[in-house]
Image (cartoon, rainbow, N blue to C red):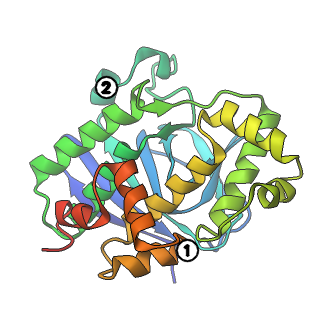
Amino acid sequence: MAQFSTELLLKTRTVAIRDVVCNGECRHRSDEECAHNTSLVYPYRGVFMRHVGRNETVAEANQMLFFNAGQGYRISHPVEGGDACVDLSVDAALLAELAPRDQIQPGELFGFRRQRRRIDPRAQALVALLRHGLHRKVAEALEAETLALTLIRRSLGERTSHAAGASAGRQKLVDRAKLVLSSDLARRWTLAEIAAEVGVSPVYLTQVFQQVEATPLYRYQLRLRLARALDLLGRYEDLTALGLDLGFSSHSHFTALFRQTYGQTPAEFQRAARLRR
């Protein structure tokens, strides 16, 4: 079995959208790879780490990663289960038009300064709508192109995304906490358990996580679980079972939090994504 597979969902003059699935067999750092085109990568299932020089980034469903053309990187999977991502490539001239100047690195070759940005729930929902619609062949090219450009604008917006800024030590601490959460999304973690896993006090963990990610630890974990729900909505007819499988206490609890986060219930999202009649 191949370590990863790539499915081209859409290719037009404006955008190319691919679904990339990796089985996660490479637990340690892979051989160095190099991106041929600058792309925005949206993990929607599982977790992996991307290594660029001495910099490391945890890639999971709350993040969007920049893969710059000509930049070498390595991938590792510290958590079992592999990962899946939507890879969105747009012409460099169009990206330059969409991206704020302070996010673009200087030089002749177009690229982004940072490795990642944290995206908001609306962006997560757009990723799911794009993927589900293209997989089921119910989204036409014009609709998909429009959704893709809306997703990029949202992913780069200062009010709708967040660029983490912290010392290397604090970033590594937060990354360890993310890996703990991603190792078992359905588990009802306590703060003490997570803090013990990363080797710091609960108070220090909550303070550092809030400073680095600009969101509380509990909310970050909730959005990871709800992002997994977005991924799985096409496979479940019984939404009560889906909620329970993801660790929610009841169907009403799952539905209320999903609606609070994405502005519609799971059933309404299924209909909007044309997963159900």
Q: Looking at the picture, how far across and down is residue 28, in whole percent?
A: 74, 64
The secondary structure type at the circle numbered 2 is helix
Marking on residue 220? none
Residue plotted at (40% across, 46% down): 121
Residue plotted at (66% across, 72% down): 80
Three-letter amino acid code at the position of disc 1: Asn
Q: Is 225 left, or right, of 7 in this rendering?
A: right
Residue plotted at (45% across, 25% down): 109
The secondary structure type at the circle numbered 1 is loop
**7 in relation to 155, above or below:** below
Q: Is 1 left, or right, of 275 in this rendering?
A: right
Three-letter amino acid code at the position of disc 2: Leu
Quadrant that contains the C terminus: bottom left
Q: How crowded is mark 1: few (under 14 residues within 10 Å), some or many (20 or more)?
A: some
Q: Looking at the picture, how far across and down is residue 276, in whole percent?
A: 18, 74
Q: How crowded is mark 2: few (under 14 residues within 10 Å), some or many (20 or more)?
A: some
Q: Looking at the picture, how far across and down is residue 209, in whole percent?
A: 70, 39
| Closest to the observer, 16 or 227 | 227
Q: Looking at the picture, how far across and down is residue 241, in whole percent?
A: 42, 81
Q: Identify the image quadrant of residue 56.
A: top right
**11 in relation to 240, above or below:** above
Q: Identify the image quadrant of residue 205.
A: top right
Residue linked to disc 1: 23
Q: Is 19 left, or right, of 199 in this rendering?
A: left
Q: Is residue 54 visible?
A: no
Mark with earlier residue (1, 2):
1
Q: Can residue 234 be seen in this view?
A: yes
Residue linked to disc 2: 98
| Closest to the observer, 31 or 131 | 131
The alpha-carbon separation of the residues under discs 1 and 2 comes to 33 Å
Residue plotted at (58% across, 48% down): 220
